[in-house]
Every structure is written in structure tokens, then in C-alpha cells.
Amino acid sequence: MRFASSILSSLLKPVDRRGFKAIVEKHDGDAYGKSFNSWQHLVALLFAQVTGSASLRSIEIAFNAQSNQHFHLGCARIARSTLADANARRPAAIFAELFAGLAAGLGRKARQEGAQVLRLIDSTPVPLAAYFDCAASNGRIRGLKLHVLHDPEANCPLRADITPANVNDIAFGRGLTIEPGVTYVFDKGYCHFGWWTKINESAAFFVTRPKINMRWKTLRKRSVGDAQGDGFVVTGDREVRLASRGDSKLPLFLRRITIRRDTGDVFDVITNDASRPALEIAACYKARWQIELFFKWLKQNLHIRKFIAMNENAIRLQIFAAMIAFVLLSLARRTTKAKLTFKRFAELVAMFIHSRRRIAEIEKPPPVNASGAKSRRHPGQLELAYV
């Protein structure tokens, strides 16, 4: 019989085992758990994310129930205590670096000449007050923050970081490598004049919301042109400079574009882009909603709300495992050219996680056993037909 990989094995194919081993050696990831190495740990946490296993016991029972699949996965049976120890000790940087490598492959798409390249930046809170009291607080939540650089065209995260909740969002932004020609879209939480200047000096662009207390002086009004967009209207376009004390010498060209949503809300966006029409700039800011949808899908379909351990290292591992699961599912869906929605595709992967079938045919029913339909009657045998 021809060998067929399981769905879980096919899902893991994009992971370069040799490259992963190098990452583990770099961080000395197997120093305290050679009997349960980093690869087995990765497979166990990805299995938990995809299948929705929400506790150490459920991971142990569900994973060990299919022990006949472990050999081809390069794994063995797991125990709750072993998994708990690995969650507490193994460096989360291993999973973080693996995610970065996989995300780079997912987001690598050929740029069309003259095409607009967007990068969305935002963060989402990860409340942990129910798990331990010592979690950092930013005044609103006590826990961690997940920061993401998102590619809306490929619909995938390109970079992620996890920080205490009291770390300002701009710390993640300032650590990013700015690509020339790219437009970075973010909200007012990333207001930092030094960073804006860095983006401008790197021949890149930004689109953001100004803070309420910023004061502006209009230098010149520009023609709005075609002002009607999808769900919004551009009502103003002005070249401005900051009029606050000490800020008026900011060495940037700035435009202030006023937008009115169909709901009646009116707000401004600021950009250093001098050439594109105001309608395109407004559409860029509207695209920021895609990263909010990504966070919503991540929280509703993977496990970054309920955690299987009560220490920060385990929580970081679980969050990065969720990000890796998202990338692997996206890669599998893109490779197989599945016409299913992402949610439906993820549900089928969870349902048939240990089935030996091609992942490209995951939505098709199993083939009918052709041998069972053949008649075993001898050609010379009398056959009675009941009417």
C-alpha cells in the first residue's frame, strides 16, 4: 500500500528540520529536556492549537490516543509533567525565531512595478490577571501585549513580539527595519516624532492618526478631487506643520487629511506622502482594519486567551505556537489552492488531524471501496430478482 502522510505531518512540512535544529542549538533549547526535545514540544503545542486542546491533560490524552502516528512525526508519547516542565524551562525565543522564518516565507510575494506596499502595525492585550498577580499593568489590563507587523496583501503577520503590558507600543515600532517605498499604517499609539523622521529619512511613508492635543498650522490647501471612497468621504486635504511649542521645527513634510465615515464620524490622518491622492491615503488607513480582524480571528480560533500553564514563559510559548499554527495553516491553504474559507479549512484540519490523506483533498469525502461493490456470483449461478 502506498504511504500517505497524515494531515499533521503535511502541515509541518514547511518547517526546515535542519534549520530548526540550528535554532535550538543556538538557544541551548534541549539543555534540560533531552527526553522531550524541542521538536516534540513544538509538535505537541501545535497539535494543541489546531485541535483546541485547552489543558495539559487534554493534550496528553488526545495526542497519545494516536500513538501509531508518532513515529512518522518524529515524536513519542507525552506526559503532562514532562510537558509542564518543558513549558516552564524551554526558551520562548526558539519558537519566536521559527515563527519569523516561516512568516518571511509566507509574506514573500513578488512586487508589481508601481504597486502600493502596505505594512500594518498594531498590538493587542493579553490579560493575565486571572493567572498571576505579578503581571505588569498599563492601567487598563494586567498582563502582556502581542505586537504585530502585518502584510494585508498576503494576509499574514511578518513579525511579532511579546512585551509586558506597560511597554509602550512605539518600542516595537522603533525596532522594525524600515523598507524604502513601503507605507506603514498605525494608530495614534505610535506617535513619536523621532520615529516619524526615521521613516521619512528611509524613503518610506506613514499614515497615522494624530493625538487630540496636537496643534496644526495650515500652510496650503490642496484639491480633494474624487472624494468618495468605500464607506467614507474625504472632506479636506491640507499641507500643515506642527504649531505646538518646540515642535514647529520638525523637519517633515506633512499632510492633514480629513475623513468623514458614512456613520457620521469625522477624523484626521497625518501622512508624509506628498504625491498620492487624498482618497488613496484614506483607503490606506481604512486597510488598518485588517489587522484588527487578524487579532479577532486569532483569539476566536486559536488559544491565546485560555492558557495551559501559569508562568510567563509557558504563556509566551503558547502565543508563539498560535502564531506558527496560523502561518502553517496559511501556507497549507495557499499551497493546495483550497477554495474553502480560512475558518472552514482550519476546522477540517482539526477534524482530520491524524488522517492519512492528501491535505489538498481534505474537503472531499473518502473514496468508496470499489472492491466491495463487485458481485462475487459465479457466472453460471442462478440469480433471483425480487420485485
Image: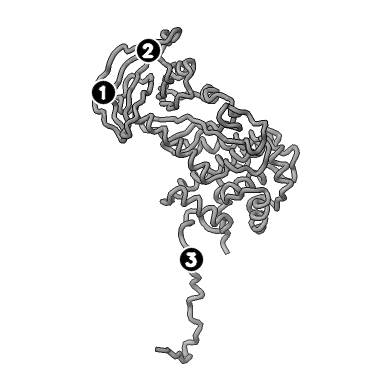
Residue that mark 2 sits on = 241
Amino acid type, callout 1: Val
Q: Position of residue 363 (x, y in %)?
A: 46, 57
Circles 2, 1 touching at the beta carbon (< 8 Å): no
Q: Identify the element where label 2 is drawn.
A: strand
Foreground: disc 2 or disc 3: 2
Amino acid type, callout 3: Pro
Colouring scheme, one of rainbow, by chain, secondary structure, one colour: one colour
User: Which comes before the other along the chain, label 3 or label 1?
Assistant: 1
The residues tagged by marks 2 and 3 sit, at their Cα atoms, a distance apart of 68 Å
Q: Crowdedness of circle 2 by 10 Å Cα count: few (<14), some, many (20+)?
A: many
Foreground: disc 3 or disc 1: 1
Q: Position of residue 315 (x, y in %)?
A: 63, 38
Residue that mark 1 sits on = 224
Circles 3, 1 touching at the beta carbon (< 8 Å): no
- Can residue 333 be seen from the camera position used here? yes
Of residue 89 and residue 382, the one placed in the foreground of this image is 89
Of residue 64 and residue 375, the one placed in the foreground of this image is 64
Of residue 370 and residue 93, the one placed in the foreground of this image is 93
Picture quarter containing residue 278? top left
| Number of marks present in the image shown | 3
Residue that mark 3 sits on = 367
The residues tagged by marks 3 and 1 sit, at their Cα atoms, a distance apart of 60 Å
User: Which comes before the other along the chain, label 2 or label 1?
Assistant: 1
Residue 321 marker: none
**Would residue 249 be found to the left or right of residue 302 on screen?**
left
Q: Position of residue 312 (x, y in %)?
A: 66, 35
Q: Identify the element where label 3 is drawn.
A: loop
User: Which comes before the other along the chain, label 2 or label 3?
Assistant: 2
Amino acid type, callout 2: Arg
**Would residue 35 be found to the left or right of residue 241 on screen?**
right
Quarter holding the N terminus is: bottom right
